[in-house]
Amino acid sequence: MRPDLFEAPDYYNIDDLLSEEHKLVRDAARQWVKRSVSPIIEEYAQKAEFPTEIIGGLAEIGAFGPYIPEQYGGAGLDQISYGLIMQEIERGDSGVRSTASVQSSLVMYPIYTYGNEAQRKKYLPKLASGEFMGCFGLTEPNHGSNPSGMETKYKDMGDHYLLNGAKLWISNSPFADIAVVWAKNEEGRIHGLIVERGMEGFTTPETHNKWSLRASATGELIFDNVKVPKENILLGKTGLGAPLGCLDSARYGIAWGAIGAAMDCYDTALRYAKERIQFGKPIAATQLQQKKLAEMITEITKAQLLAFRLGQLKNEGRATTAQISMAKRNNVEMAIKIAREARQVLGGMGITGEYSIMRHMMNLESVITYEGTHDIHLLITGADITGYPAFQ
């Protein structure tokens, strides 16, 4: 494993827009990634295992529910701090960022926002510390981009709910202690339920043979007549808008995270181009390589400004679903294009595990699909600007 010499690009002096707290939070996450993720991540990606030993470190840097109030174990930070943490973690690996995103936006967020005080006190402190790990059950084998068609259902049995169904492509599921599961009641209304590991009939088989997010644990959620206590239902919001609200938070984090992956690929390519000598000079001195690198830094800078402004809107409570979709789609597409160009700068070395680029490229093939596909986000923007939904 090569030493982590990463230097973050900041072509437009965006650091000047950040508060001292923002920079302290970001720098703490950056140093932790250099110390705890970079030395081990290639090995774990090759083995297709999630490094569970880093869970404590993720908690220590505030990666689990950073915007959750301190009274519930969170760090009480703003949305820009959350984005910066996601950026730094994904600079290390998209799969590790996925673990933090799921814990924060898809598990802690709905419990805090839609749950009652007893649920907040029971689950949030343990999730913030990493004592509990969570997952989010929305996607199903037959329903990905159309979650309203979900087939997972629950019945009111008097003193409990009886849950049946299955969820697919669930990050963290193989080791999760709890799952926030979205299911329809007998009237067809969608509700969130907190399902705990150990409940009879609840299993979490792992998904194997992935070429992407190899250092992330992915699996299924199977519910076979699972008895869920009535106190485990989230009553603060029902209908499809409830899980979609969680996805807004997660997509916002991804918009920042993808910048981290792009920055790592750019920094690797720039460093390599300066060191690699061909025809008697560094390849960085050639026009074609300069074109690649100049386009990379331009696109990263545009994405940084897009994410920062979105963070301001999030802090003000004014960020719309469509604005978040635009940032998620744009920034992930930007990152995957940069990964592909950076790989070419490195030539054959770009495909080896000695460098991070190919791992980022494979990871981003998943990121461009999950939390809303590239095409669906285009349609969200299209519906917003025209007034005509084209989903059906």
Image (tube, rainbow, N blue to C red):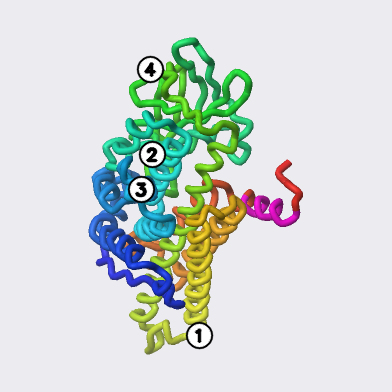
Residue 384 on the magenta segment? yes
Q: Which mark is residue 200?
A: 4
Q: Is residue 159 left or right of residue 20?
A: right
Instruction: Work out whether mark 2 precedes mark 1 in sequence or the reverse, and give the earlier one.
Output: 2
Mark 3 crowd level (few <14, some 14–19, many ≥20, 10 Å Cα) = many
Residue 240 lies within the magenta run: no
Q: Classify 14 as above or below 355.
A: below
Q: Position of residue 326 (x, y in %)?
A: 59, 57
Residue flagged by tag 3: what amino acid is it?
Answer: Ala
Q: Which residue is mark 3?
A: 215
Q: Circle 2 sits in a helix, a strand or a loop, which is it? A: loop
Q: Earlier in the sequence, mark 1 or mark 3?
A: 3
Magenta segment boundaries in residue numbering: 377-386
The residue that label 2 is drawn on is 172
Work out whether residue 359 can be spotted.
no
Give the spatial CA distance, label 1 vs label 3: 36 Å
* Discs 1, 3 touching: Cβ within 8 Å: no
Give how far apart the Cα atoms at labels 4 and 1 are: 63 Å
Residue that mark 1 sits on: 287
Q: Which is more foreground, mark 4 or mark 1?
A: 4
